[in-house]
Amino acid sequence: MLAVCDHFGTIDAVVAHSFGGFVSLLVAEGGPPMHHAHPIGRFVLISCPNKLSEVTLDFGGALKLGPQAQRVYERHVERVGHRSVATFSVSELLQHIDASVLLLHGRADDEVPFHNAEVIAASSRAARLIGFDGLGHRNVLFAPPVFRAVMHELAPKRAETAAPSRRSATAPKRERVLQHSA
């Protein structure tokens, strides 16, 4: 993700799901294993876990790793990431990032429980949380109210948009429709 950000330049906003939230915040923070930070203006994090230790534990459980194999796996993650699995969290990353964060999370998420979003939101004044009833970890991505929340967050605010230009009554109808939908 850092290479993509560097290639395209300024990134106004990132929408990330689940572990993608960790990745995008890590790029913005720029600490190890990143070579540098890439500023990102705002984040929309959907169903984002807070603690890496819970992610690795769930992953190890899915693979049916025993305690020794789990620790070897976590040590490898620590070597690659240059951070302790036990202390690495989204809440901690947000302390080093100057950006607004909108958290969208389903209250019925059984993969990343809703309390993750509550803890993240409580850790940063720049974070806002919207919870959705009846949505789990994956179906939250396709739910119309979630899509509307993302679009509302990313759409330019009225004060930021230019005043509509006055067009003559003879202007082609198609142009007017495109102007209003842009």
Image: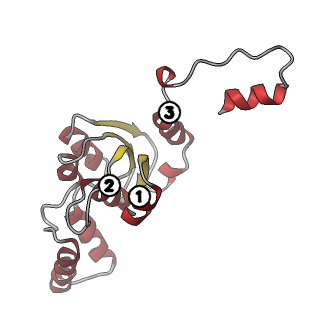
> In this view of the protein, which residue sits in the foreground, 92 or 50?
92
Question: Could you tell me the amino acid type at mark 2?
Answer: His
Residue drawn at (82%, 30%), measured in percent from left and top?
Answer: 174
Whether residue 55 is situated above or below residue 118 in the rendered picture: below
**In what element is the residue under mark 3?**
helix
Q: Are the residues flagged by discs 1 and 2 in contact, CB closer than 8 Å?
A: yes
Residue 70 or residue 31, whichever sits in front: 31
The tag on residue 5 is 1
Circle 1 SS class: helix
Number of the label disc, if any, that sits on residue 38:
2
Give the distance between the C-alpha atoms of the residues marked 3 and 2, in whole angstroms. 24 Å
- Report the Cα–Cα distance between label 1 and label 2: 7 Å
Q: State which tag comes first along the sequence, 3 or 1.
A: 1
Q: Is residue 60 left or right of residue 147?
A: left
* First of labels 1, 2 by sequence position: 1
Q: Nearer the viewer, residue 111 or 88?
A: 88
- Front disc: 3 or 1: 1
Residue 145 as seen in the image, left or right of residue 20: right
The image quarter containing residue 66 is bottom left
